[in-house]
Structure formats: C-alpha cells, structure tokens
Amino acid sequence: MEKDLLVKSINELKHKHNAVIVAHNYQKDEVQEIADLVGDSFALSKFCANNDAKIIVYCGVHFMAESAKILAPDKTVLLPELDAGCPMADMVTAEALREEKKKYPGAVVVCYINSSAEVKAECDICCTSSNAIKVVQSIKEKEILFVPDKNLGNYVSQFVPEKKVNLWNGFCITHHRVKLDEVKKIKELHKDALLLVHPECQPEIVEVADYVGSTKQIIEYATDSDCKKFIIGTEMGVMYTLKQNNPDKTFYLMSQGLICPNMKKTSLESVYEALRSMKNVIELEEDIRIRAKRALDRMLEIT
Ligand code: CIZ
Ligand code: SF4
C-alpha cells in the first residue's frame, strides 16, 4: 500500500476501534509522525493509563508495552512487532535475579524500566533514566542491587557515594558499542557543539559529555539551550523531535552505530496490520502485574 493510503487507513481504523497510537522517541520518523504521543517509555505508559481509548497501539519494544499494560490493565495493548524486544532487558531473568538477591540480603533491588514485568515483580523500586538519581537518593538502606544496566547503575552510583551499589552485568548493545575514539573525533570536528549523552553509554563517554540525560531530558536541554549545535549521544530516533522542535539548530549524531534494530522493526505496515487484525495482544498474569506495579508505584511516590 502507498504511504498516504496506509496513513489514511490507519487513522480510519484508529477511530473505528477507539484506539490511540503511541510511539517511543527511538521509532522510525514515519511511525512518530502518525502517533498521538511521542515520548519516553514512562510518559507513554502514563498517557495510556490516563485516556479513554480502549485499544493502545504501542510502537516500541516489548518491555514498554508491558509497562503500559501494568498501568492500564483494562485496555487492550497491541505491540505491532511482537518480536521487537530489548536485548538489555533480556540480560536479566526473574529466576537469575532471585538467585542473585540471595547474595545481597538487605540490599534494595532497583530495576531500570528496561526490564520485563517478571523482573520488575522481583524488585523493590523501578526507575527510568530521567529519575534514576532521585530514586537511588531516596533509598535509606546502605546497599543497592541495580539491574540490568551496569552503565546507568555506575553513573547513578556517583550520586550516592555513601551507598554500596552492586551492578548487574547488563548493557544496551546500541549505546555500549560507541567508542571513545569516535566521540573524540566528532567533538574535534564540531568544537562549538555541546555533547549530550545518554547514561546507557560507557563511563568514559559519559565523562567527556557536557550533559547526561534521558531522551526526554536531552530533548528538553537542547530545546532550552542558547547553543545552536549539539552532538547527540543516544539512539538516532530522537533526531526527529529535536529537529522538529528546533529548526534553527544543528544536530549531529555522536556515532552512526546509534541505531536500535528492535526499535526500527515497527513500520506503518505493521501498525496497520495490528489495528486490522487486533493481533499481538500483550497479556500479563495478574499476580506478576500487581507485584510489578508495586515497583512502579514506589517510583511514582518519590518522583
Ligand atoms: O525509558 C525510556 O524510554 C528509555 C528506554 C530511554 C529514555 O532515555 O527515554
Ligand atoms: Fe534496549 Fe538499547 Fe534498544 Fe533501548 S536502545 S530498546 S535499551 S537495545
């Protein structure tokens, strides 16, 4: 089907079924274009929970659609590409985490939102890359087990030097593969640009950044800044909103490797197909959902 016709058909189906389409900041441009809301995983989940739609088409990866289902259990959540997963989230399973927890009795278990509902159900408190520092600072206990992102965990541990932060050995393959050499080169090439990076990058990259933040924070920082040039150290999908919001500014991607293949699986065709067939429904066991929601609710209490 031609793009215009596809977009028209998607919109017709959306109205017919009382559906909304949400797209993560890392989705393809054409998917972001048709979404009712573009944002980070937590903003999208909250939006899903707080509107009247019956059907949510979640353009993102599996753990994100699960987060929407955790917060909006009465809605039908569709993931257009059911095998769009997050390799980092897959680096920890509930079973492996139960074993690891035995080594750290008394430690508060913090899980990055990039984790499955089953893993969240094993944790005390959840965090996003926007609020991870606040979350670890809110913890009274002296010891933390942080899963699954060792880079984000390492970054936030600097803000709680009085605590022992044990890290799970997980990472985002997309952010982790960026090398310091290429970052130095692009900085050299654009000396007047600010370097904004995601905390999923390796520590030596975070160290040379002018600003460290989540997708939302990077977009807000660049939009509010008086500077006109930025090197962007997160997945290339954020370029869409950055350019949209700031036509007078220039953005360079920190590395051409900053592309998440799972995020790019969703297409207009798969969105159309999800709405047409009502397939790819996200289901969660109620017990898991309630325990996972507890970790999300505890995060909400302090942010
Ligand atoms: O929580 C999200 O959406 C992710 C994975 C990244 C971010 O920085 O927004
Ligand atoms: Fe997972 Fe990294 Fe892709 Fe985000 S960019 S979904 S953390 S693999």
Image: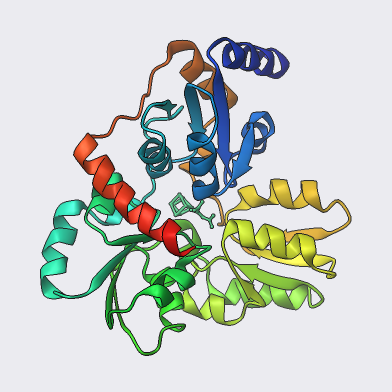
In this view, which residue lies farthest toward the bottom? Answer: 162
Residue 250, image x, y percentages:
82, 59
Q: Is residue 236 left or right of residue 130?
A: right
Q: Please give the name of the residue rendered at 48% of the width and 22% of the height, measured from the top-left corner.
A: 55
Residue 17, image x, y percentages:
53, 13
In the image, residue 48 above or below residue 187: above
Residue 113, image x, y percentages:
40, 54
In this view, which residue lies farthest toward the right? Answer: 248
Q: Is residue 169 left or right of residue 104?
A: right
Q: Please give the name of the residue rendered at 79% of the width and 78% of the height, measured from the top-left corner.
A: 191
Does residue 260 appear anywhere in the picture? no
Q: Please give the name of the residue rendered at 77% of the width and 60% of the height, measured from the top-left corner.
A: 223
Q: What is the tally of numbered marks visible in this picture?
A: 0
Q: Please give the name of the residue rendered at 63% of the width and 11% of the height, measured from the top-left corner.
A: 12
> Considering depth in this image, is 165 or 150 the residue closer to the camera?
165
Q: Is residue 14 left or right of residue 174?
A: right
Q: Quadrant of residue 62?
A: top left
Q: Is residue 72 left or right of residue 184?
A: left
Q: Quadrant of residue 61?
A: top left
Does residue 119 appear anywhere in the picture? yes
Residue 287, image x, y percentages:
20, 40
Which quadrant: the N terminus? top right
> Considering depth in this image, is 118 or 1 the residue closer to the camera?
118
> Considering depth in this image, is 18 or 239 the residue closer to the camera?
18
> Considering depth in this image, is 169 or 123 the residue closer to the camera?
123
In the image, residue 149 above or below residue 155: above
Colour scheme? rainbow
